[in-house]
Image (cartoon, helix red, strand yellow):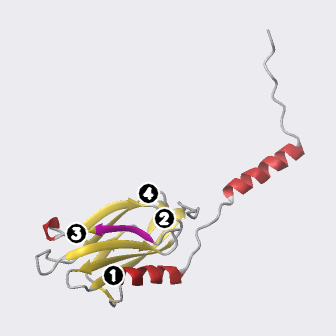
Amino acid sequence: MQAPPSFAPPNRRQWLVSQIALGACVLVRPAHASPDALQRALQSFAAGVPIQTGRVQLAIASMVDNGNTVPVTVVVDSPMTERDHVTEIALFSERNPLREVVKFQLGVRAGRAQVSTRIRLATSQTLVALARMRDGSVWSHAVEVIVSIAACIEEPS
């Protein structure tokens, strides 16, 4: 019968190599912040229509502990009638690897122009909700969110 292997504490060299390896794992590429990229994404959604402020309410906590799962609700002031209804609601982020976080398509039968979901946030940033109305107008609301523990810190390949 063999004796179980004994555990010897690492020497300085082994400890240093393990710390460098750990640092390499922790230091992943951060999400690159670019206000220009956010503006391009917003303009792409608006398709040349001026973005107006109002009619949209983005409900999210102003400070979140963990960016991995953040509840968010977007409500648009619309009667949701045949003549006046929301056709699309989209949520954009300033610093996530992908600017367009989510897009919802709505019809008249939706009843209310309200959507709720959970999203990931890379870091503290500005979120923008846009709503496209049946008449083609685009409305917005922006919110600053502070994130204590970041999520999605790697860029897509």
Q: For numbered disc 1, what is the local secondary structure?
A: strand
- The kind of secondary structure element at disc 3 is loop
Q: Position of residue 151 (x, y in %)?
A: 53, 60
Q: Is 103 included in the stretch rendered in magenta? A: yes
Q: Indicate the quadrant containing the N terminus: top left, top right, bottom left or bottom right.
A: top right
Task: Residue at 67% x, 56% y: name it.
Answer: 26
Q: Is residue 94 magenta?
A: no
Mark nearest the camera among 3 and 2 is 3
Residue type beneath disc 1:
Ser
Of 126 and 81, the residue lying toward us: 81
Residue found at the very far left of the displayed protein:
82
Residue 149 vertical placement versus 85 (above, below): above
Q: Quadrant of residue 14?
A: top right
Extreme-top residue of the structure: 1
Asked if the residue under mark 1 is in contact with the one under mark 2, i.e. CB atoms within 8 Å, the reply is: no
Disc number placed over residue 121 in the picture, else none: 2
Residues in magenta, as a range: 100-104
Crowdedness of circle 1 by 10 Å Cα count: few (<14), some, many (20+)?
Answer: many
Q: Main secondary structure of the magenta part?
A: strand
N-terminal label among 2 and 4: 4
> Which residue position is annotated with label 3?
106
Rendered image: mark on residue 69: 4
| Earlier sequence position, callout 4 versus callout 3 | 4
| Label 3 close to label 2 by CB (< 8 Å) | no
User: Is mark 2 in CB contact (under 8 Å) with mark 4?
Assistant: no
Location of residue 47 with respect to 1 vertically, above or below: below
Q: Secondary structure at mark 2?
A: loop
